[in-house]
Amino acid sequence: MSATPRLQLQGITKRYPSVVANDGVSLEVLPGQTHAVLGENGAGKSTLMKIIYGSVKPDAGQVLWNGQPVQVRNPQEARALGISMVFQHFSLFDTLTVAENVWLGLEKSLRLAEVARRIEAKASEYGLHVDPSRPVHTLSVGEMQRVEIIRALLTDPQLLILDEPTSVLTPQAVEKLFVVLRRLAEQGCSILYISHKLHEIRELCDACTVLRGGRVTGECDPRRESNASLSRMMIGAEPPHLEHRDHTPGEVVLQVDGLTLERDSPFGVDLEGIALQVRAGEVVGIAGVSGNGQRELLYALSGEDTRADPKAVRVAGQPAGRMGPSQRRRLGLHFVPEERLGRGAVPSLGLAHNLMLTRTESVGRSGWIDVKALRSQAQEVIRRFNVKAGGPDAAARSLSGGNLQKFIVGREIDARPKLLVISQPTWGVDVGAAAQIRGEILGLRDAGCAVLVVSEELEELFEVSDRLHVIAKGRLSPSLRRSEATVEKIGAWMSGLWDAPTEVAAQVAANA
């Protein structure tokens, strides 16, 4: 390996009207090195990566590439140098197919059919299956993540930037991705890796730069650190320990019986005989590999899909299968979708007005909005959930991914729901915020709320759930008590073989 750093940043500074995102940041990445950038939400990590990739221009500082000063003015120039990036917020066009999206970032001399062939070959090589002909709007979040990773790998990068690449991947998919990344590093590719999963950084990375408040506050070899020491470097403290006390549930709040729905697109998943209960004072978790019916189930529960038999979905005893979202909210159901921007929040609206997507307390009987009350309500969510934002009028798209997630989750929890359906509750948030959100979920449970959590983070599900299901190919497994569930068993059930002997299911899961 060359002793010349592949990438050097010297005194990088980026100011916005309400915040200094990067303040004199310097770091270097060697060829073949997997270098973690660690920091809490809003520490400036994503801004720094966008500067390297050319999608944000720094106000001060210098970038050196293979020892030579460069000005990376746009992502096209970055790709020409050999820099590829997988964003936390996906940069995909919903109306285009997977192949068409990937084609946009490749040489225009390639034919679309050749791009599709390369996608299939790369997906097969790295175990990241995706259909090149599928429109992006039909993909789950996890499948979109695979598209972004494959698109980056197809450019044969010298530097690969990964911003929260495993946030919606299953443990099996993460293991396969790590095999890919280690192989790339052995071939000399440098990797900049952002993740809030400290065990991943310790397992994968051989260097780490810590940011806090936009400044570099530490450097270390993460392989020699513990989760606790990395947490202290990142947020100044260890995350609080969650106490999951046994709790006797009350009456049934959500009852799903024989929910069967045909897919609403050629690329969707049919739901077959879904049956589950969630009681007051109980957290029920649903695990599964992305794209196995989670999207369809969540749409049917939230009221976005009203094709179900009225009695197939009951909320607080009322037949709700044909009710829309606002009708279900009047019964006490609140919902947190997995897509933050576009479904969870309107990017161009301020946080206060985004409250009104699901909250109407500030609207008087005459229909007029009490703007002062609305802003006060938003400010309380910002304060309670420690959201780093430029105030209640800050546009949703101006927040980091983790801070927007905290606001959306806080908006629904603060509504004191009777039933909370939440998808990927801690996607992209730091360890301290993840612990807070999970603690708030348990607090809701203890206050008598019924909570359904759909997540691809098994650690999260084991931490908050009283009972667990697995969804696979549109079918839902029987429930397991948390005390009966193991990572191995849940992983085996993800293949849909909960009726098969344990050793057979485990073998299928290992080969998946």
Image (cartoon, helix red, strand yellow):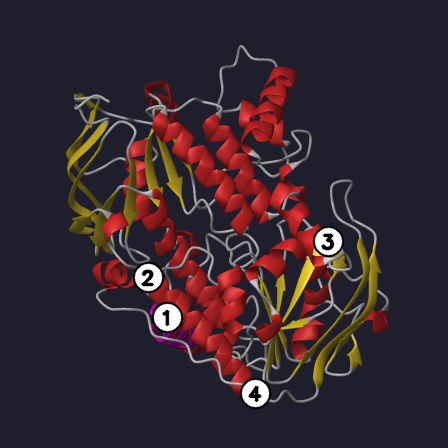
Q: Image quadrant of residue 59?
A: top left
Q: Which residue is mark 2?
A: 389
Real-space CA distance between mark 1 and mark 2, rounded to the nearest whole angstrom: 8 Å
Spatial CA span between label 4 and label 1: 30 Å
Which dot marks residue 496?
A: 3
Local secondary structure at mark 4 = loop
Q: Residue 326 occupies which quadrant of the picture?
A: bottom right
Residue 191 in the image, given as x and y percentages of width and height: 33, 34
Q: 100 or 18, which is in the foreground?
A: 100
Sequence-wise, the earlier of marks 4 and 2 is 4
Mark 2 belongs to which amino acid?
Ala
The residue indicated by pointer 1 is 382
Is the C-beta separation of discs 1 and 2 under 8 Å?
yes
Of badges 4 and 2, the one in the foreground is 4
Percent position (x, y) of residue 44?
A: 27, 50
Q: Position of residue 250 (x, y in %)?
A: 66, 89
As measured in the structure, the alpha-carbon distance from the residue carrying label 3 to the one carrying label 1 is 41 Å
Q: Position of residue 241 (x, y in %)?
A: 36, 75
In the picture of the structure, the residue carrying the numbered disc 4 is: 247
Comparing marks 2 and 3, which lies closer to the viewer?
Answer: 3
Does label 4 or label 1 sit earlier along the sequence?
4
